[in-house]
């Protein structure tokens, strides 16, 4: 039978601090024997799609300026 999770104000505050300001991402809480042992945070950054055409044009310019290799 599973042990009840021991969750006190300290852990609640730690989780709150990790979630503070998280816009995109995930938080993983690892529990062993009913106790929190680890908290992992993965944060994602999203960029505006308006920059995508400019980045694509830059990439094409770089590709076309590279010398082609001869076999």
Image (tube, grey):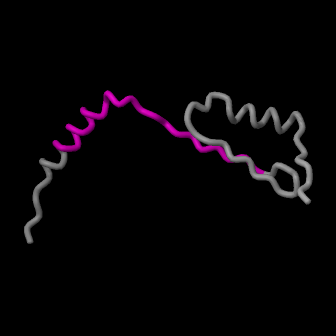
**Residue 49 percent location from the top left of the image:** 35, 31
Hey, which quadrant is residue 70 in on the image?
bottom left
Q: Is residue 61 above or below residue 13?
A: below
* Residue occupying image coordinates x 14% and y 52%: 66
Which segment did they paint magenta?
38-61
Residue furthest to the front = 1
**Residue 4 percent location from the top left of the image:** 91, 49
Where, quadrant-wise, is the N terminus in this rendering? bottom right
Hey, which quadrant is residue 6 in on the image?
top right
**Residue 19 percent location from the top left of the image:** 68, 33
User: Quick check: 33 left or right of 22?
Assistant: right
* Residue occupying image coordinates x 88% and y 33%: 9
Residue furthest to the left = 70
User: Quick check: 50 left or right of 24?
Assistant: left
Give yes or no for residue 53 being in the magenta stretch: yes
Hey, which quadrant is residue 20 in on the image?
top right
* Residue occupying image coordinates x 75% and y 36%: 15
């Amino acid at each position: 039978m599973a042990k009840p999770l021991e969750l006190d104000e300290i852990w609640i505050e730690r989780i709150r601090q990790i979630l503070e300001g998280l816009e995109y991402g995930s938080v993983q809480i690892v529990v062993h024997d009913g106790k929190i042992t680890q908290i992992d945070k993965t944060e994602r950054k999203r960029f505006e799609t308006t920059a995508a055409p400019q980045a694509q044009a830059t990439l094409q310019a770089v590709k076309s300026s590279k010398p082609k290799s001869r076999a």
